[in-house]
Image (tube, rainbow, N blue to C red):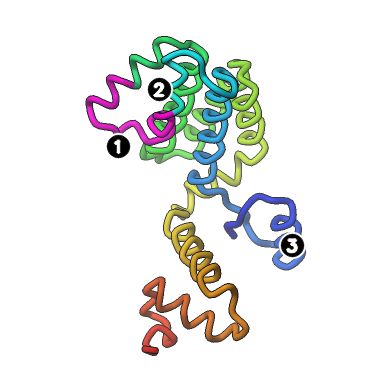
Amino acid sequence: MISDLGPAYVGVIAQAVPHAVHLLDRFHVIQWVNEAVNTIRREVFGGAPRDELGRQLKVKKWMLLRAREALDLGEKRLLGRLLRQNRTLQRAYLLKEQLRGIFRYGWIYLGALRRALEGWCRMAVRSRLKPLVQVGHRLREHMEKLVGGFEHGIKMGLVEAINGKIAQLRRRAHGYRDPQYFMLKIYQTCFLHDDPWAQVIL
C-alpha cells in the first residue's frame, strides 16, 4: 500500500487494511530534501537578499532544486560558482545530490541500500542544518517503507501526475455532483484506455 505519510492517511489505512505493507516512494523523500534545501536558502539570505549572491539565488533557486543532470553546462558552472561563495548552502546541495545518487543507483542487495541510507542519515544529522537534520530523522523513522519501495519497484511519478490532473478537473468544474460522471472524466483525461469507461466519448 502506497499513500501519503500524513497521520490521517496512515491511521485510516491501519484500520481498513491492517495487514497491508506500507511503502514509501523515493519521489516523496526528494520532495522532503528539496523543501529542506529551499528552507536553508531562505534562512541564509533572510527576507530580502542584500548582496548579489542572495539576489541571484533568489531568482535562480530552481537550479538548487532541479536534478543536476537536467542542467546544461552553463547552468552547472554558474551554480558551482554561486555555491562556492556560501559553504552552508553548498553542504545542503551536496547532501541533496548524494541522496539522489543513492536513489539512482541500481541496488541488488537491500542490505547495502540500507547501509547507504543509514550513512546518509548520519551525514544529514551531523550537518547541523536543522531542516536536513529533520529529514535525516524522518528517513530513519520510515526506512523500511522506503526500502520496501525499492524492493517492489513501485514508482509514484505516474500516480502523482494522475492526481494532479484529477485536481485540475475538480477545480475547473468547481466540483462534481455525480461521482460516476466525475469518474468518466478522470478516465478520459488520464487516458486510462483499459477501463470500459474510457471508451465512452462525450
Q: Is residue 174 above or below residue 59?
A: below
- Tag 2: Cα neighbours inside 10 Å, few (<14), some, or many (≥20)? some
- Decide if residue 156 is on the left or right side of residue 141: left
Between 77 and 14, the one lying in front of the other is: 77
User: Which numbered disc, 1 or 3, marks the residue that appears first in the sequence?
Assistant: 3
User: Which numbered disc, 1 or 2, marks the residue that appears first in the sequence?
Assistant: 2
Q: Which residue is mark 3?
A: 12
- Tag 1: Cα neighbours inside 10 Å, few (<14), some, or many (≥20)? few
3D distance between C-alphas at marks 1 and 2: 19 Å
Could you tell me residue 173's position as x and y percent? 53, 75
Examine the structure image and report whether residue 172 is included in the region drawn in magenta.
no
Residue 119 visible in this rendered orientation of the protein: no
Give amino acid for label 1: Ala
Give amino acid for label 3: Val
Q: Nearer the viewer, mark 1 or mark 2?
A: 2
- Decide if residue 24 is on the left or right side of residue 106: right
Q: Which residue is mark 2?
A: 56
3D distance between C-alphas at marks 1 and 3: 38 Å
Give amino acid for label 2: Gln
Per the rendered image, the range of residues in magenta is 59-78
3D distance between C-alphas at marks 3 and 2: 45 Å
Quadrant of the image occupied by residue 32: top right
Say what secondary structure mark 3 lies in: helix
Q: Which residue is mark 1?
A: 70
Say what secondary structure mark 1 lies in: helix
Disc marking residue 39 = none
Could you tell me residue 24's position as x and y percent? 56, 48
- Decide if residue 7 is on the left or right side of residue 45: right
Could you tell me residue 130's position as x and y percent? 65, 22
